[in-house]
Amino acid sequence: MNDTAAPVRPEDENRPSDSRGRLRATLDPLKPLLPYAFRYKPIIAMALAALSVAAGATLTLPLAVRGMIDHGFSAESAGAVNAYFGAMIAVAATLAVASATRYYFVMILGERVVADLRADLFRHLAGLDASFYDTARTGELLSRLTADTTHLKAAFGSSASVALRNLFMFLGAVVMMVATSPKLAGLVLLAIPVIVLPLIASGRGVRARSRHAQDMLAQASAYAGENLSAVRTMQANGAQTSTVARFKGVVENAYEAAQKATLLRAFVTAGAILIVFTSIVAVLWLGAQDVLAGRMSSGLLSQFVLYAVLAASSLGELSQVWSEVSAAAGAAGRIADILAVKPKIVAPAHPVAPPARWSGAIVFDKVRFAYPTDPDKVALGDLSFAVAPGERIAIVGPSGAGKSTIFALLLRFYDVDSGAIRLDEVDVRALDPLVLREAIAIAPQEPAVFGLSVADNIAYGRDPASREAIVSAAKRAQAHEFIMALPQGYDTMLGERGATLSGGQRQRLAIARAILADAPVLLLDEATSALDAENEAAVQAALHDVMSGRTSIVIAHRLATVLEADRILVLDDGRIVEEGNHASLIAAGGLYARLAKLQFDTARAAAAN
């Protein structure tokens, strides 16, 4: 697991040795989640009210049993026995209604808390910057968003319901035991520390093992996600067998980790139950001696035994819940790790207000930048250039020259290490990133297509958009014809990543998306690279129309696409080494001329064959 996604938590390094510290260490990861529950105080109040009624009803049953036993089953006591049985039926009905009510409110509280948490966690993930995702694995993040939050749903739902019910029952049973027989109750209560202290001490081990199991599951999810997202590549390379075998190994690791965590929880539960019921049997034997000696009635002993059994079973259930809470604390800690990650790209405290309409003037002023994942390698070194409003600039150069980095910095996916980037004389760091990106439309080389309708894909990020505007953008991108050939036209649902579309069709959807954005700055990252010659000519004509009146920067790997640029910047090793138009750069005989000769010679050779 990578360090970005799972930083070391303080409690893993400084584990307290005392029981109180261990209790705090187990529960502390859950504390940040309490505000989610406290948003719904009426639901909590209804659950507690139902819980109180259910506990009270249960605690009255031993009283009825005592009355029946002490009165005996004779003809003279038939009326009293009937009354006791009638009362027990009424208590059972009350218990049933109260228990159902308690279960409903506690469970919907758990569902509500987890739904809110998932929404907030996804919002947080969506706001993290590119440097986080340079190292994070999407599958592991999805595991935290789904599997870990499911653990918490149990903690706030079923586990909370069981815990509260048994806590109320335990406390009520203890009070009634003391009221029934203080001597026997004292003997029972002496066993409680022997039961509770080991439970608290085991919480750290359960939490650690549960967290390890969740980490292993996250790795399995990440591996599966990576391979399923590239399933065609996997099949084309005949890698199904090895991939399945490797995934099975990862799943086995997750199983073994979960098995160890479950085994520890099982031992803890077994130990608690053994101690509890052994103490009950011992006290029952002592009570039987009092009955034989005439110091206690049979009914009173039966009442005490029932309360003792209620207390013991409640404490046994609490031991099991404690193990589940410890496991949930591990999940909460993993989620807290993500929520603790602060985005590096944020809006300033007092962002500059954008103008009514950007003119699109762009300046890179002595920009120096290295990616956080490779800080020793300079991606851009003292790069300076200016783009006038409405100018068309093409950027060319070999792979790794820094062309895409210029786009990433202009969109402020990263901040420059030194220098400045300005849009209309405003430093982009002084703007809210959302405002900055609204002024820029981009058609990337590898466009993202989502599992939405065609119309929703074109309007992605620009909702709401009218159907007329969507169709108009598609027509200008030369996409309307193939869209109408789809089964439901613009309402056709596309598969994940647009796997059913050709590369050219995906790029035309991305171009339509950029056209619909109607932004003053247009970034094209070899947006026609996947098109055939006929479609490329059509899309180039559309782009010529779209770029009119807009500042446009085009990254071009195929030099034939930059002939109409007002100016060409030739980049090499993060620096501008040449600048001019096509004719002047060819005449200069530098890097551009060599790249052009290589491409055009290759094209002629391909045509000859």
Image (cartoon, rainbow, N blue to C red):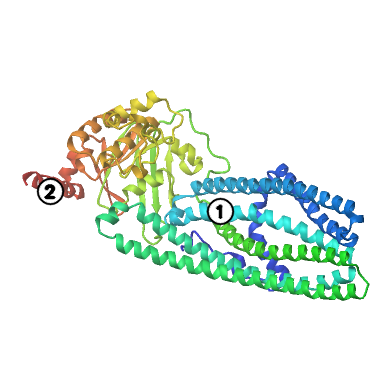
Label 2 CA crowd tier, 10 Å (few <14, some 14–19, many 20+): few
- Residue 197 locus on image (x, y percent): 72, 72
Disc 1 secondary structure class: helix
Give left or right: position of 170 versus 494.
Answer: right
| Label of residue 602 in the image | 2
Q: Is 480 above or below relative to 183?
A: above
Q: Position of residue 179 (x, y in %)?
A: 89, 63
Above or below: residue 490 compared with residue 530: above
The residue closer to the viewer here, 415 or 319, is: 319
| Eye-nearest disc, 1 or 2 | 1
Task: Please tell me which residue is depicted at 38% across the width and 44% down the height of the picture.
Answer: 364
Residue at 63% of width from left, 69% of height from top? 204
Q: Quadrant of residue 441?
A: top left
- Residue furthest toward the left? 608
Residue 497 image position (x, y, % from top left): 35, 44
Apparent side of residue 573 relative to residue 296 in the rendered image (left or right): left
Please tell me in which quadrant of the rendered image residue 372 appears: bottom left
Q: Can residue 599 be seen in this view?
A: yes
Q: How far apart are marks 1 and 2 (CA)?
A: 56 Å
Q: What residue type is labelled 1?
A: Thr
Q: What residue type is labelled 2?
A: Thr
Identify the residue at horizontal 88%, vertical 53% (top origin): 78
Q: Where is mark 1, residue-wise?
A: 150
Q: Which residue lies furthest to the top in this view?
A: 468
Q: Residue 133 carries which label?
A: none
Q: Examine the rendered structure and indicate whether residue 102 appears above or below residue 475.
A: below
Q: Is residue 168 left or right of residue 147?
A: right
* Depth check, front residue: 202 or 556: 202
